Image: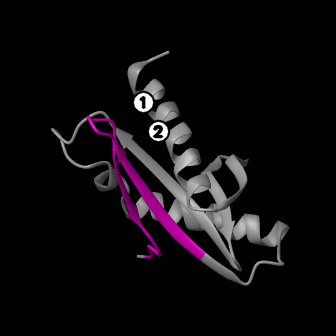
Amino acid sequence: MSKHIETGKKGEELALAYFKALDYQILHQNWRHSHWEIDLIASKGRMLHFIEVKTKTSNRFGFPEDEVDVKKIRYLTSAAEVYLQIHPEWKWIQFDILAITLSEPTAYFLIPDVYL
């Protein structure tokens, strides 16, 4: 397995623990539809969260959140539209980015309610 895939998997494991510790209910991990994927779908209270997780081993070449561009946000919102067609009971939604840097100590940066 290549290093960037291992880094991504490690980040997703850490993200799962991070949100569970904040009392989010994890509904789906790596939810797929067609060619789209959402890293985490979670709820807290009445809010449904679509979460993009980005992980890097250091900030030497930029921050993890810098990897989430307009194209990625469009991809995420398109996938969320399909999810909401399947699960229309959700009225309150939010798009979040969790940036993780695997340095010592591991750094977490949550950007809530992202929309471009």
| Residue located beneath label 1 in the image | 7
Residue at image location 63% in from the left, 49% down from the top:
37
- Scheme by which the image is coloured: one colour
| Residue located beneath label 2 in the image | 11
- Pinpoint residue 7: horizontal percent, then vertical percent: 42, 30
- Pinpoint residue 10: horizontal percent, then vertical percent: 48, 32
Locate the C terminus and report the quarter of the image it occupies.
bottom left
Q: Work out whether 104 lies above or below 42.
A: above
User: Seen from this angle, which residue lies furthest bottom?
Assistant: 91
Instruction: Give the residues in magenta.
Output: 94-115
- The 10 Å Cα crowd at callout 1, few under 14, some 14 to 19, many 20 or more, is some
Residue at image location 49% in from the left, 66% down from the top:
96
- Pinpoint residue 33: horizontal percent, then vertical percent: 73, 51
Residue type (three-letter) at the residue carrying disc 1: Thr
Residue at image location 20% in from the left, 46% down from the top:
62
- The 10 Å Cα crowd at callout 2, few under 14, some 14 to 19, many 20 or more, is many
- Pinpoint residue 74: horizontal percent, then vertical percent: 50, 65
Q: Is residue 114 magenta?
A: yes
Q: Is residue 31 left or right of residue 57?
A: right
Residue at image location 43% in from the left, 60% down from the top:
71
Q: Are marks 2 and 1 in contact (CB under 8 Å)?
A: yes
Q: Work out whether 33 lies above or below 69.
A: above
Whole-angstrom CA distance, mark 2 to mark 1, is 6 Å
Q: Secondary structure at mark 1?
A: helix
Q: Secondary structure at mark 2?
A: helix
Residue type (three-letter) at the residue carrying disc 2: Gly
Label drawn at residue 42: none
Q: Is residue 1 magenta?
A: no
Which sits in the foreground, 68 or 110? 110
Q: Is residue 18 left or right of residue 26?
A: left
Q: Work out whether 17 lies above or below 21.
A: above
Q: Is residue 21 left or right of residue 83?
A: left
